[in-house]
Image (cartoon, helix red, strand yellow):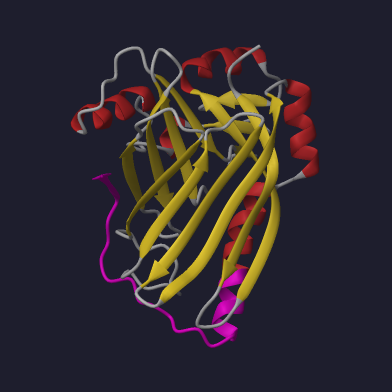
Amino acid sequence: MTNSCIYNGSVIHKRFKPKEHFFKYKIFSLFIDLSELNELNDKLKFFSLNKLNLISFYEKDHGERDGSSLVNWVKLNLGNNNINTENVRIKLLCYPRILGYVFNPLSIFFIYDKNENLISILYEVKNTFGEQHTYVFKVEGNNKLIQNNCSKKFHVSPFIKMDCNYFFRVLNPAEKLSVIIDQYDNEGKILFASQDGIRSDLTSMNLMNSYLKHPLMTFKIILAIHFEAFKLWAKGIKFVMKKFKIKNNITFES
């Protein structure tokens, strides 16, 4: 049995202002121990590493986004933030590619020390313009609930301005998954977003069952993003222009 697993659950977005808006979609995510990638590639039917399959994982979808080692990328950025990388285990929560396609609005790297204590979290955020920003946090104490906050540094939604703050609340993934993000401006809460899930082992049968429950999920995600954006526009919510271009930024948060 591997450390990697599947989480079947849902994503919720609730907008509070200037007009209310709500949606909920069923999804599944992989929680991959990056040291097991080659083993998963050899062991699992319907799954491949860095090549087309029904379900696949491409290293170029994350980190430096050039296909280079994600482990080395994580360790480099941890070291730049004075976080000890000796004997660390790195796990990544993300959507897989389905039939070669994926869009991950948020992927989360969980970094554990040799005693399985969580020591760092990296929130990797993407937008539909092909850009990416990663927020790096050091985790101290052996808490099941991890709480982080920072200012927004990356254009995501064209309907939310840049001048606001994120508050992250994440349960250390176990039998249940819970990721909550509250977004505030100077006048109060703008958005609540969450992802939850129930764990199952990452086996060929469970992977196929998750796919059958959510066929073409990754295509539905990008379509849903544009559909929900259209509904926001139809409600008369002001469009916020993107002011600058980036490719792949990273910030170290306190």
Q: Identify the residue at image location x=43%, y=80%.
A: 239
Residue 57 visible in this rendered orientation of the protein: yes
Residue 191 forms part of the magenta stretch? no
Q: Identify the residue at image location x=54%, y=46%.
A: 179
Location of residue 157 with respect to 103 vertically, above or below: below
Q: How many marks?
A: 0
* Left/right of residue 26 with respect to residue 173 in the rendered view: right
x and y, in percent, of residue 38 in the image? 52, 15
Q: Residue furthest bottom?
A: 236
Location of residue 94 with respect to 241 vertically, above or below: above
Q: Quadrant of the N terminus?
A: top right
Q: Quadrant of residue 215?
A: top right
Q: Quadrant of the C terminus?
A: top left
Q: Nearer the viewer, residue 215 or 156?
A: 156
- Magenta residue span: 228-254
x and y, in percent, of residue 18 in the image? 50, 83
Q: Nearer the viewer, residue 188 or 209?
A: 188
Q: Nearer the viewer, residue 85 or 227?
A: 85
x and y, in percent, of residue 30 in the image? 60, 33
Q: Nearer the viewer, residue 105 or 149?
A: 149
Q: Quadrant of residue 231?
A: bottom right
Residue 102 visible in this rendered orientation of the protein: no
Q: Identify the residue at image location x=29%, y=59%.
A: 153
Location of residue 206 with respect to 125 vertically, above or below: above
x and y, in percent, of residue 191 in the image? 51, 67
Residue 232 forms part of the magenta stretch? yes
Location of residue 103 with respect to 157 vertically, above or below: above
